[in-house]
Image (cartoon, helix red, strand yellow):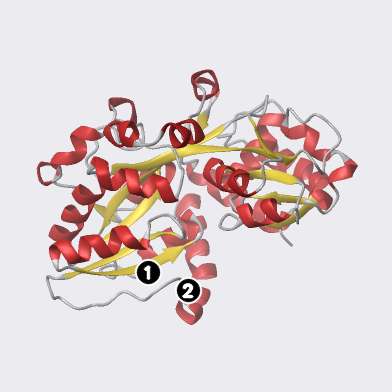
């Protein structure tokens, strides 16, 4: 068995117990009723009103489950084929899902609103022919600082080592982003597959660990807005939402490395309600609907027609400067090196 598959299997085993015992969001149904759609998505990523409006228009009942990491999503799809009809995965995990045979081809003829997606968001390396995935939202992972609580100018990831940040930073609960940031600080590729480089990044993160108060991908905005943390590395939308509550918070594009991501709709293998999944994707890609998603969750939007409908202040809020985006890096599937990342991450969080 390939090392990568061993790593994926170990991840599934580690996560399966918590998923079965505690679940993650509402449970999906196994009903074959065609008026059902079982969705698996990130938490706080799709407004309830959008779901209710879809249900009202189509008569299709949406069962909505959530996860907090790509790894959790992968584990659930790998062990529960047929449970979900639609899921959302980041680009590098689209690649993983395709390689592992866990997703089905998408009938783009039944998604006419795909024409609203900018061409630069299609044909990505993970799925060059867009056979298995449709763009949903995209964005960046950057540094944020509460300027009222910090007395130095922060411009880089290595600045976070400053002792004044002891036990006061929030970091994304995402191994690839956090280890990737450390790799970049050390002058290596954030997508490195070299064991020595990845382990060196882990040692650098051990130096940073005393400054990390919490790993949190879901609720960093509240920690930042309340002043419970001084700063950290978070999703751009979390930063924007925190700024709405506390104007002292500042976005900072780090000198060494800007992590970019793109999340995509995928149809899991064995989905029982594929037609309903296609209807839902097409519904979300309507400009007026996609606009409503971003009004609540201000992530950057690949739906160029939806962006045109946004108020000017929201357009500014989600904008990623072109010069920064050009320097950005998307995570890629690192294959067998996944085992090394998992080990380094587990050691860091002990």
Name the spot of residue 302 as percent of width and height, x first. 34, 35
Q: Quadrant of residue 167?
A: bottom right
Residue shown at 18% from the left, 40% from the top: 113
Front residue of 98/331: it is 331
Q: Quadrant of residue 129?
A: top left
Note whether 92 is above or below 22 in the view shown. above
**Disc assigned to residue 19:** 2
Q: Residue furthest top?
A: 323
* Residue at 49 percent of width and 81 percent of height: 21
Does residue 144 appear to the left or right of 18 in the view shown? right
| SS for callout 2 | helix
Query: The residue tagged with tag 1: helix, strand or loop?
Result: helix
Q: Give the mark nearer the N terminus: 2 vs 1.
A: 2
Task: Pick the residue in front: 3 or 343.
Answer: 343
Q: Which mark is residue 103?
A: none
User: Residue beneath label 1, please?
Assistant: 79
């Amino acid at each position: 068995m390939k090392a990568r598959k061993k790593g994926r299997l170990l991840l599934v085993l580690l996560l399966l117990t918590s998923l079965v015992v505690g679940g993650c969001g509402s449970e999906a149904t196994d009903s074959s009723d065609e008026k059902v759609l079982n969705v698996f998505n990130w938490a706080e990523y799709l407004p309830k009103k959008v779901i209710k409006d879809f249900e009202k228009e189509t008569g299709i009942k949406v069962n909505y489950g959530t996860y907090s990491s790509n790894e959790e999503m992968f584990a659930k799809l790998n062990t529960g084929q047929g449970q979900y009809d639609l899921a959302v995965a980041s680009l590098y995990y689209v690649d993983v899902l395709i390689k592992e045979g866990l997703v089905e081809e998408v009938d783009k003829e039944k998604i006419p609103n795909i024409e609203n997606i900018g061409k630069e968001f299609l044909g990505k390396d993970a799925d060059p022919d867009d056979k298995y995935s449709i763009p949903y939202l995209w964005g960046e992972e950057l540094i944020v600082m509460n300027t009222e609580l910090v007395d130095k100018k922060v411009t880089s990831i290595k600045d976070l080592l400053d002792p004044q940040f002891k036990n006061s930073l929030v970091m994304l609960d995402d191994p690839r982003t956090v280890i990737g940031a450390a790799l970049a600080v050390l002058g290596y590729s954030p997508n490195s597959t070299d064991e020595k480089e990845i382990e060196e990044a882990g040692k650098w993160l051990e130096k940073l660990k005393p400054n990390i108060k919490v790993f949190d991908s879901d609720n960093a905005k509240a920690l930042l807005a309340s002043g419970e943390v001084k700063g950290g590395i978070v999703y751009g939308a979390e930063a924007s939402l925190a700024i709405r509550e506390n104007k002292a918070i500042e976005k900072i594009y780090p000198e060494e490395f800007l992590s970019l991501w793109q999340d995509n709709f995928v149809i899991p293998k064995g989905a029982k309600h594929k037609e309903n999944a296609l209807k839902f994707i097409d519904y979300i890609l309507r400009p007026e609907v996609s606009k409503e998603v971003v009004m609540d969750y201000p992530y950057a939007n690949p739906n160029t027609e939806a962006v045109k409908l946004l108020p000017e202040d929201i357009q500014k809020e989600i904008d990623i400067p072109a010069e920064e985006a050009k320097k950005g890096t998307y995570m890629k599937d690192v294959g067998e090196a996944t085992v090394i990342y998992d080990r380094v991450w587990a050691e860091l969080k002990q």
